[in-house]
Image (cartoon, rainbow, N blue to C red):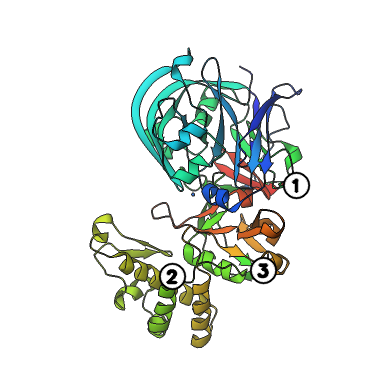
Amino acid sequence: MAHKLVQVTLCLWVFTSLLLPSPTAGLYRVSLKKQRLNLNRFKAARIAMSGGGMLHNYGSSDGEVIPLKNYMDAQYYGVIAIGSPPQNFTVLFDTGSSNLWVPSSKCYFSIACYFHSKYKSSRSSTYTKIGKPCEINYGSGSISGFFSQDNVEVGGVVVRDQVFVEATREGSFPTFVLAKFDGILGLGFQEISVGNATPVWYNMLNQDVVREDVFSFWLNRDPSANEGGELVFGGVDPKHYKGKHTYVPVTRKGYWQFDMGDFLIGNNSTGVCEGGCAAIVDSGTSLLAGPTAVVTEINHAIGAEGVVSAECKEVVSQYGDLIWELLVSGVQPDKVCTQIGLCVLNGTRYMSGIKTVVEKENMEGLSAGDQLLCTTCQMTVFWIQSQLKQKGTKDTVLNYVNELCQSLPSPMGESVIDCARISLMPDITFIIGDKPFKLTPDQYIVKMGEGITTVCVSGFMALDVSPPRGPLWILGDVFMGVYHTVFDYGNLEIGFAEAA
């Protein structure tokens, strides 16, 4: 079969996409639409988590396109079909997972299944029974069901004998009930595929239905636009980016993970990632997610407000001086909270970055309050250590840390800001491949609602990922909407260029 470029038009959380044939030979587009955000649906949708001197030239629109729909700048989705004759489903194209799943006609007891299309195996002549049970956990919910096999149509090409999950239970009530998508199509590596199922993208390559072993995303952040975005399998669409892409190597297969350099608030380095930070590009995450302690600093700098933590202020008040003295005297940061008695050393508890990792058996017997004090202490150590590097005085540093307690994100991870202050906020800059990638306040603040009901939410969300995968920064749709992103499977690289 001649190689094709497959393009998928994406929609952001309004999850309706039309599969429209393009007049260009070998190019198939699925258009995406976008809807205004509202706070409740946004919370449900928050997470459903030049390089090396090489010349990257993937040509123009000679292939297949899937248009995407854009829902509230929080979810982008498109249409696929499963079975013969085809049964249509809207799916979230997710680079942070690797399995394909859709609701099953055998899903009887989950409310979410009654609001979405369901796959009926009895109506497909190409269906093959597998039946092996499985469960998939996401950052905002989980699903369980069983494996089946059938043909899957993506952007005008048919992937034969694709193994997928028929979901018979969808957890986390608001996440999937309010979602505009029926299921999820994972575009991550097979290393994180549940049940070691071969991902759709791998089968597209194995069955020789795409021209190049790359795919690319363009996410339209204009909430009034009819077209939500575009996912291209087998190449890129030059009309959706400016200049050249900056490529960075994939450092760990599983997620699309790479090493990110420092990031700046305004023109000032935070110093957090001077030695490099792990980051992943995740089209299934709405915002920018990072370790709680770091995101709290960013939200403080931009004036975002979260939950006022009494525990945080208590630690600063009672132990701030002691933490300062221990750090100045040379005690390792990961030992401080143990020495002052707020973290109990059970042999395997340790501090990695800003995240406390405890084996499950060592967590037994610890109350929720003990765990919270330990975590709060470690965040305080992180903040004080960061300020020590900038040679701040003790009083100044402790006052600053006390202010950070006011900016701790809410339990759901997000923080609200005053919409009238957007013009006063600093730019945020990520250093990727030794080049700056800037986000302006208008780009990293998400607006929901209209008129006097408008709510503005910080695009930075707290999310702690445990080792060995974490700590991780997750560059979600807030970042991908500003920068056109190429996922180069052949060269194991990720490319970023200004979106057009």
Q: Quadrant of residue 215?
A: top right
Question: How many numbered marks appear?
Answer: 3
**Residue at 48 percent of width and 82 percent of height:** 398
Q: Would you say 311 lies left or right of 498 here?
A: left
35 to 359, vertically: above or below: above
Q: Nearer the viewer, mark 2 or mark 3?
A: 2
Q: CA distance from mark 2 to mark 3?
A: 23 Å
As helix, strand or loop, the secondary structure at mark 1 comes to loop
Q: Residue furthest top?
A: 125
Q: Would you say 274 lies left or right of 345 here?
A: right
As helix, strand or loop, the secondary structure at mark 3 comes to loop
Q: Is residue 437 visible?
A: no
Amino acid type, residue under disc 3 in the picture: Gly
Q: Which mark is residue 379?
A: 2
Q: CA distance from mark 1 to mark 3?
A: 24 Å
Q: Earlier in the sequence, mark 1 or mark 3?
A: 1
The image shows residue 210 at horizontal and vertical percentages of 61, 26
List the residue tagged with mark 1.
243
**Residue at 55 percent of width and 15 percent of height:** 85
The image shows residue 464 at horizontal and vertical percentages of 44, 58
List the residue tagged with mark 3.
266
